[in-house]
Amino acid sequence: MHERVTRQDALTAETRDVPKQLVNITEAARLSTVLRLTVQQCFGIHTEKLVELNLQPFRVRKPVDAQKGPRKKAPDGPARLPVEPTL
């Protein structure tokens, strides 16, 4: 009987510690966000230095080359379906 009471007291104390641990996790997440944004602000969002720090730099899409030519145009008029012969 004494073992059960001791175990219950230990579990009760552990459940009181869980909210404190959650607060610590939340604070750590906020701190990591602040540090990430500070590094991006310091080096700039386009620099490749961010890759060394395991952060994704902002990369702009490259423009379409003029050598590739224009895109294919859609055919004029409505689409035609093949006609099956009727008997």
Image: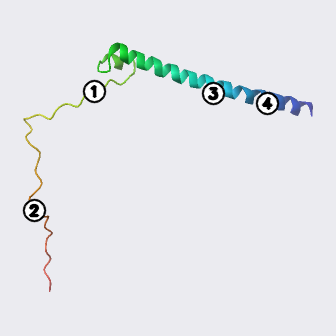
Give the secondary structure at mark 3.
helix
List x then y, in percent, for residue 54.
Answer: 39, 21
Quadrant occupied by the N terminus: top right
Identify the residue position indicated by label 1 in the image: 59
- Earlier sequence position, callout 4 versus callout 1: 4
Identify which amino acid the numbered label 1 is placed on: Arg
Give the secondary structure at mark 4.
helix
Q: Nearer the viewer, residue 64 or 1?
A: 64
Identify which amino acid the numbered label 3 is placed on: Leu
* Above or below 29: residue 70: below
- Earlier sequence position, callout 2 versus callout 1: 1
Question: Is 52 placed left or right of 28 in the picture?
Answer: left
Query: Do residues under tags 4 and 3 come within 8 Å of each other at their CB atoms?
Result: no
For residue 12, the mark is: 4
- Earlier sequence position, callout 3 versus callout 2: 3
Quadrant in which residue 47 is drawn: top left
Q: Which of labels 2 and 1 is toward the front?
A: 2
List x then y, in percent, for residue 41.
Answer: 36, 16
Cα–Cα span, label 2 and label 4: 76 Å
